[in-house]
Amino acid sequence: MTAFRPGPDREQPEDLLQHACTLVRLCGRDSAIAVMFLALVLVGTVTRLAAGLPGPAALALLPVLAGSFAVSAGYAVRSRRTLVRVLGDVRGRTGSPVDPGAPWTPFGSAVALDDRVRDVELRRLLSAAHRCGELSWQAVAWSVATGVLFLFWTLAAAMAGG
């Protein structure tokens, strides 16, 4: 993803809003991908452990697998919490309703914000969307690493005869 910096006086509020919406959609998609990888790893690990304890090599790799899983899940949770916190901050500063179903429409019809305040809030929302996108991308990267570690763990368990 490239940075969005069109230059002074060329940014329109609609462009900032559209860019933030795109980032939030990508963030949600990335988080969903990470969660699916983690769910597959969790189900596979629990199924394998339910069949009996694996050998010592597999048991030695289990904490590494669990650590990678925890890091990925942590990034996914931080991404969501960052987004919710920023939306709450916008609501607190502007008094405008923020609909969780459509989070990038912070300006309610009953509240008229001047252009300066609107632009500052849109830039804050865009910045938060960038942070959330980075966190969700980290969650995907760690979930893929967790999947690879799961494959090694499964091979170690199979080689140990367990």
Image (tube, helix red, strand yellow):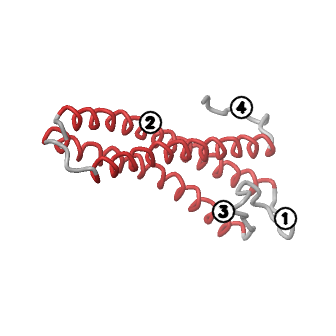
Task: Tell me, yes or no, whether the two marked residues, 1 and 4, touch with CB atoms within 8 Å.
Answer: no
Could you tell me how far apart the alpha carbons at marks 4 and 2 are, in whole angstroms? 32 Å
Residue 123's spot in the image, x, y percent? 67, 48
Tell which tag, 4 or 3, sits nearer the viewer.
Answer: 3
Q: Which of marks 3 and 1 is nearer the N terminus?
A: 3
Whole-Å distance between the Cαs marked 3 and 1? 14 Å
Asked whether disc 3 touches disc 1, contact meaning CB atoms under 8 Å apart, the reply is no
Residue at 69% x, 45% y: name it.
20
The residue beneath circle 4 is 7
Task: Residue under label 3, please give it.
Answer: 90
Quarter of the image where the C terminus is located: top left
Q: How crowded is mark 2: few (under 14 residues within 10 Å), some or many (20 or more)?
A: some
Question: Which residue is depicted at the point 49% across and 48% down?
Answer: 35
Which residue bears the numbered disc 2?
Answer: 141
N-terminal-most mark, 2 or 3 = 3
Element class at badge 4: loop
Image point (39%, 44%), residue name = 41
Classify 10 Å Cα crowding around label 3: few (below 14), some (14-19), many (20 and above).
some
> x%, y% of residue 75?
44, 49
**Residue 147: percent from the left, percent from the top?**
39, 37
Residue at x 63% of width, y 51% of height: 124
Of tags 2 and 1, the one toward the viewer is 2
Left or right position of 25 against 105 = left
Residue bearing mark 1: 112
Q: Is residue 121 left or right of residue 159?
A: right
Q: What element carries label 1?
A: loop
